[in-house]
Each structure stands twice: as C-alpha cells, then as structure tokens.
Amino acid sequence: MEFFLQQCVNALQWGSFYALIALGYTLVYGVLRLINFAHGDVFMVGAYLAFFVSTGLLAPEGMFGFSREIVLILTIPLTMILTSMVGVTLERVAYRPLMRKGAHRLYVVITALMCGLILENGNLALLGASRRTLPTLLDKTVYNIGGIAVTNLKLLVVFTAVLVFFALYFIVTRTRMGMAMRAVSWDRFALPLMGIPLEQVVVFTFALGSSIAGLGGLLFAMSYPVLDPYMGAMTGWKAFIAAVVGGIGDVRGAFVGGFLLAFVEIMVAAFLPSTFRDLFAFSVLLFILWQRPTGIFGKPLTTKI
Amino acid sequence: MLKHVCASALVCAAMLSVSGSALAAEPPIKIGFPIPLTGEIPKVGESTKYAAELFREEVNAKGGLEVGGKKYPLQFIYENNESKPDAAVNVTLKLITRDNVLAIIGPQSSRQAVPAGAVANDNETPMISPWSTNPDTTKNRPWVFRAAFLDDFQAPVAANFAVKQFNAKRAAVLFEISNDYSKGLADNFRATWGKRHGKDSVVAYESHGPKDQDFAAQLTKIIAAKPDFIFLPENYNFVALIVPQARDLGYKGPFMGSDAWGSAELMTLCKDACKGLFFSTHYAAAGAQGATKEFIDKYSKKYGYVPDDVAALTWDAVALITGAIQKAGKVEKDVRKMRKTIRDSLASIEEFKGITGNMRFDDQGDPIKCAVIVEIDQKGEFTFKESVCP
C-alpha cells in the first residue's frame, strides 16, 4: 500500500510537468487549430532562461545581495516574461507571415517543427554541449508521512500545476479575453467583423502558453537539475500526446491527460519490468484513443490539422 | 665567406656524428605512436605524447635502455591519426613498413584501436593500446595487447568492494537500457553477485531510457526491495539526477559506480549529493602513493597539470614494452625476429608493477590487473581509496 501511494506521489509530480506543457499545446491548438511543435523546446528555453536569470541574480557576490528566497521569487516572473517573449517572437517571425499569406495549416505545423529544431541547435551552437545545472534556490526538506517520502519541492510543483490549471480555466471561461479566445476558435474569419482584434488575441494566447512553459521549465530545472538542449524534445512530445489523449483544445483535457500519462508510465514501471515502460504506456494510450479518437474531453470536429 | 660557413658546418656535423656515435654505440630502439594529435580528442594525443616523452627523456638521460649489458637509446616516432579510423590504419602501416618500428603503442580510443590492431596483427608487430576498452581490439589477435581493463571487468570489482566496504548482501542495479556499456556492466554484475550470494540476492534490477529525467518509479521499486547498496553503471549526467532523487525518496544507503562517473563535470552537476560515494576506475591522481605519486609529481612539474588516466596508462604501456625488451635480454638486428621476441616476452610477463596497478596478460592480450576505487571526498575531489582485484 505504501509502495502504491509512493508511486502515486511520484506520478503526481511527473504528471504536473506533463500537464504544464500540455496546457500550452492545448491553448494554441484551441485558439488557432495549430499544433505548435516548438512548444517542447520553448519549455527547454524556459529552463535555460531560469538558469541564466537565477545565476545572474545570484552569481556576482554582493552585487545585488539577494537571499536565495528573493532570487526564487524574482526568477519566477522574470522567467515567465522572458519565455513568453520567446513564444511571441516565434509567432511573429514564423507563424504570422504564413498565416497572413493564407498558407495551409500543415505548412505552419511543419514550420513549428523546424522552429523547435532551430531552438535546440541554436542553443547547442551558443552554449556548447556541456550541461548546465540550476543553483539551489530552495533548500530541500524531505517529509516522511507514514512511510511516504515527499519533498517541499514536489509539493510546490503539484500545487503550482493545480493553481495554473484553475487560473487558466478561469481566464478561458470567465474573462473577456477568454471569450475572445473561444470566439477565435469558433470562427476566425467572422471575428474581425465583430470588432475583435484577432492578432492581439493570438499574441495573448502565445504569451500565456509560453509563460506556463517557462514556469514549467523553471520548476523542471529545480527538480531535475541537469539541463541540456534536447531535454524539451522528448518531454514535449509526450506532453503533446497527453494533450491529445485528454482531448486537444480543451484545458481540462490537457490537465487530466498530463496526469493520466504520468500515472500510466509510473505504474507500468512500478508493476512491470521497467524495460517495457514506454511500450506498455503508449499501448494503453493507443487503446484510449482507439475508443475515443477525439480524446477524453474532445469534441468531434470536421477539420483537424 | 660562404665556403667558410660550409666548411665549419661540415666540421660541426662531423663532430656531432662522432660524439653521437660515441654516446650511443648501439642503434636506437624505435617505437611508433599512432595517436590522435588533432581531431575530436587532441587532449588524449597530447597526454600520450607527454607521458611517452617523459619516459624517453628519463631513460635516454641515463644513456639509454640497458639490454643484456648494452645501452640502446630510445627513439619514439609520433604519427597523427587525426582521431579517425582510416587515418589510424594508414599511419600504423607507415610506422611498421617505412619506419620499421619494433612495437606500436596506441591508438588510444577503441574506434581507432580496433582497425589499427588488425594492421599490427597482420604485419606481426606487437602493439599495446593503453586506453582502449572494447574487447574487439585484442580479440583473436595474438600480437595485440592493452593496458586498460575491459568494461565488464569492473563488475566483479564493484561486487568485491561492496562486500568489503558496505558489508552488503542485497544489491540493486539501475542502468541505461540503450547503452551497451551500462547494460553490459549491469548484466555482468548481476551474474557475479548472484553467483556469490545466491539467486535472489540482486533484489532489484531496473532500467531506464536514454532521455529519461525522472527515475522515481524505478527508485521507489528499488528502495522498497531494501538493498544494502545500489550499483549505478551510468554516465555521470544520469548519476547527477539519480542520486538526489533517491535521497528525496528517503534512501540513505550507499551507491557504487563505474569509470563513466569519472568526469570533472560530475561534481558541478551533482554538488553535495555525490559526496562520500565510491566508483571504480583506472587510476586516481589524488591520494596516490609510491611510483604513481612519483610519476604524477614529475609530470605535473614538467607540464603544469596533473596527468589523466591516458597519461598514466601510456606510461605503463611504454614500461611494458621496454620491460619486455629487457627481459628478452638481447636486441636482434633483424626487425621481424625482434618483433617476435618482444611479443613472446610480453605474453610471458608474470607480474608487471605498473603505476596503474600490477598486471599480467591473459591469453587474449588483456591485462589481469586491479582497479582503483575512488572516493568522492567532502571537497568533491576524486581521492584514491584502495585498489581492488577481481
């Protein structure tokens, strides 16, 4: 029982990261019907930005004289803002010109894939192959509750993921901007006729999705402090699958899908030989999609991609 | 005027040759080094050359290598293999056929050593690769030897050390499924440990993929099995993730690693979590004693930095060859005959005291030697703990 509960805690932590990334995928897809394949690499850039921001604030001894707690509190918004700028830049440079020229959505998706590769290799060229590690921003404490080990960092991660989900859900369903976002996804062409600034809504969507990726990157770098340029690729793909299984385009779907994927992955590794983890985990997901091709929360649409 | 210069130059040259021949009445012993002076791993080539030069200068300062009462100067020829397999084949062939070397030392990395070993073996020239760990380098090649132990060899070493240090009976293993090195070592460890402590003594045997960052599921499983220690034949970047995660999950026991831990980057990534852990490797500079310390001091004094394992293994390879020539007791004029003498002498070495440990060769030309166990001390330095034999 203890063993099972411990694995549940593990899955909650790991699922939080999937959920945070999947939320970004689903936001952009929900609004633009575009799969932003560069999103996993935006997450990677977020982790690196967190590294630069926190070392920049900490490193020159006495220059700012911040304590680590203050550095952490400053790093969170700075990383989110900088990462959202990266996301918006991608939209401005890569997607908007194509969209304006009326290119088919497929070409924009391929462009997104290329942008991801550019981010990875640009990072490799700029910073080299040696791995980075985030300075310790939070002293870890291990709590032992009835034989289950939890750290304060893990609690923070899960708490943040839940908080972000409710904040997003609130934005999408209860605010004017959220209404505009839903309107874009309903009918992109009728929207300007109603006096809603389409491009502003799109920029807001990208900024929102990327800032969540940045936050995820920061927390990821704190939990798994070995940064390399390819860290976002695999995690990003899996989070995308999580978003699809949950029903891409739906905020609840991304959240549930992220945790579902992590539970399946962890439980397969826990009760079967770990060699088969990905094989079994993705077979399970395939089965879910087979039963519900639009994902758990998804609604059938006539045109996808 | 010009005539004068020419004449004096001639005289000088004549004098030089006279004095040269007076110093070394015997022809030099030629050894070839096909090493990576440029390319991906130029540092390896530099270490090789520096260590060999240190050895040569020391011997030649005493008038040469003493064989059967006569002194022969050492002549080392360095050729660049550009860290490429094809170039390694070419320069090795050149050293053997054109320079008529008696023996080859190098290439260092297995990618060059495996093809170059075929050339040396076909041309019946003894070769020692100091650093190559791939079994194919020496496999079924009677003329090819190596100074480093094979990857798999570390498994029994880790097992022996764990029994002694941690008084361990139950072992757990976590390894990378897609990495031959990691998987080979893990398999080998499981077999060794199982043979010694019974079938179920490896209480957990878990793997992960090449891009994984979260190991909580595997580690929870391992911790639930209550092992006395965890064996991690992993690359250092995984070590830096696995060890802290295990501590977060409440594991307090020891870890044991292999030579892939031995990167300077390990401690920058792993920080305090890796202090106090042990791993096996070829050689440790900090805390070395005796002849090893002497070598480290001489090398650091001359070149300004502490020698790495390549330098130490190269020194041992040179010492093995020269030792084999001394043991043969004669230098024959015929190069082919002399090569045969050196090979037979190498193969029959009973015990060689090297700076990377005592060794002799098995019938594949692989050394039977002891590994060094390194402890990561509280300052984060890799310190010599003890040498452990299989």
Image (spheres, rainbow, N blue to C red):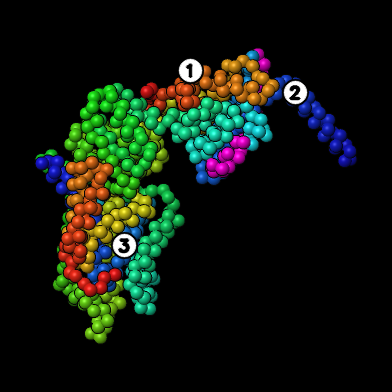
In this picture, residue B178 sits left or right of residue B107: left
Which quadrant of the structure image shows residue B228?
top left
Q: Which label belongs to residue A39?
A: 3
Indicate the amino acid at tag 2: Ser
Identify residue for label 1: B351
The structure residue drawn at horizontal position 17% and vertical position 73%, both measured from the top left corner, is: A175
| Mark 3 neighbour density, 10 Å: few (under 14) some (14–19) many (20 or more) | many
Indicate the amino acid at tag 1: Glu
CA separation in Å, label 1 and label 3: 60 Å
Identify residue for label 2: B21
The structure residue drawn at horizontal position 63% and vertical position 32%, both measured from the top left corner, is: B96
Could you tell me if residue B54 is visible in this image? no
Q: Assess whether mark 1 and mark 2 are in contact (beta carbons under 8 angstroms).
A: no
Q: Residue furthest top?
A: B69
Chain of the residue under label 2: B
Span of residues in magenta? B69-93
CA separation in Å, label 2 and label 3: 74 Å
Q: Earlier in the sequence, mark 2 or mark 1?
A: 2
Q: Which label belongs to residue A221?
A: none
Nearer to the camera, B340 or B150: B340
| Mark 1 neighbour density, 10 Å: few (under 14) some (14–19) many (20 or more) | few
Which quadrant of the structure image shows residue B134?
top left
Where does the C terminus of chain A fall, quadrant-wise? bottom left
| Mark nearer the viewer, 2 or 3 | 3
